[in-house]
């Protein structure tokens, strides 16, 4: 299994938002995936 990418995180976040009426909770798997992808991309430096 590779590192989380921005594309992976976007897919997860989209699915989460669709199943929760457009809401992604703070601290959810989806938000943690987005954070990990941002760190892995190096764009937050």
Image (spheres, rainbow, N blue to C red):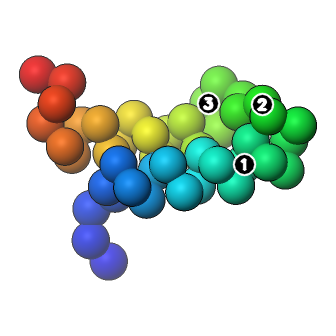
Q: Which residue is mark 2?
A: 23
Dots 2 and 1: beta carbons under 8 Å?
no
Residue 36: image x %, image y %?
A: 35, 43
Taking the view exactly as shown, the residue that stands out farthest to the bottom is 1
Location of the N terminus (image quadrant)? bottom left
Label 2 secondary element: loop
Q: Which of the two discs, 2 and 1, labels the residue nearer the N terminus?
A: 1
- Going 50% across and 49% down the picture, which residue do you hit? 10
Q: Residue 25, position in %: x, y?
A: 72, 29
**Please, is residue 19 above or below residue 17 in the view?**
below
The residue indicated by pointer 3 is: 27
Residue found at x 19% / y 43%: 41
Q: Quadrant of residue 30?
A: top right
Q: Would you name the residue on which mark 1 appears?
A: 16
> Distance between the Cα atoms at labels 3 and 1?
13 Å
Where residue 8 sits: x, y (%)?
43, 59
Q: Is residue 5 left or right of residue 21?
A: left
N-term-proximal mark, 3 vs 1: 1
- Secondary structure of the residue carrying tag 3 is loop
Q: Label 1's element?
A: helix
36 w.r.t. 1: above or below = above
Q: Which of the 4 image quadrants contains residue 7?
A: bottom left
């Amino acid at each position: 299994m590779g590192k989380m990418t921005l594309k992976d995180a976007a897919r997860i976040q989209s699915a989460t938002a669709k199943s929760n009426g457009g809401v992604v909770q703070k601290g959810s798997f989806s938000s943690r995936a987005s954070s990990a992808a941002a760190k892995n991309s190096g764009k937050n430096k």
